[in-house]
Image (cartoon, rainbow, N blue to C red):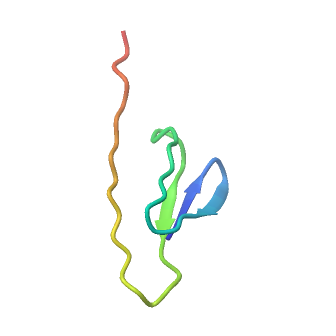
Amino acid sequence: MEVLANGTWQLLNKGEGLRFDANQPHGYRNLSSEVAIIHDIIHYPKND
């Protein structure tokens, strides 16, 4: 599984995670022929 964050594709292996600002350009891709399952949790801080 690869995640585009901060302008760079970053490889994530099983069990790894990545944190980034969701209001920035980002993407997800699976370059393998195997099924990839991700948990995508998005949190936007409340603006005061």
Q: Is residue 24 above or below residue 26?
A: above
Q: Is residue 10 above or below residue 41?
A: below
Left or right: residue 34 compared with residue 13: left
Q: Residue furthest front?
A: 15
Residue 4 lies in quadrant = bottom right
Q: Residue furthest top?
A: 48
Residue 15 lies in quadrant = bottom left
Q: Position of residue 32 (x, y in %)?
A: 50, 85
Residue at 52% from the left image edge and 68% from the top image edge: 13
Left or right: residue 18 compared with residue 34: right
Q: Position of residue 41 (x, y in %)?
A: 32, 46
Q: Position of residue 38 (x, y in %)?
A: 35, 64
Q: Position of residue 5 (x, y in %)?
A: 58, 51
Residue at 48% from the left image edge and 58% from the top image edge: 16
**Observer-nearest residue: 34 or 29?**
34
Question: Image quadrant for the C terminus?
Answer: top left
Q: Is residue 45 above or below residue 15?
A: above
Q: Residue furthest bottom?
A: 33
Residue at 45% from the left image edge and 68% from the top image edge: 14
Q: How many marks?
A: 0
Residue at 45% from the left image edge and 42% from the top image edge: 22
Left or right: residue 6 compared with residue 30: right
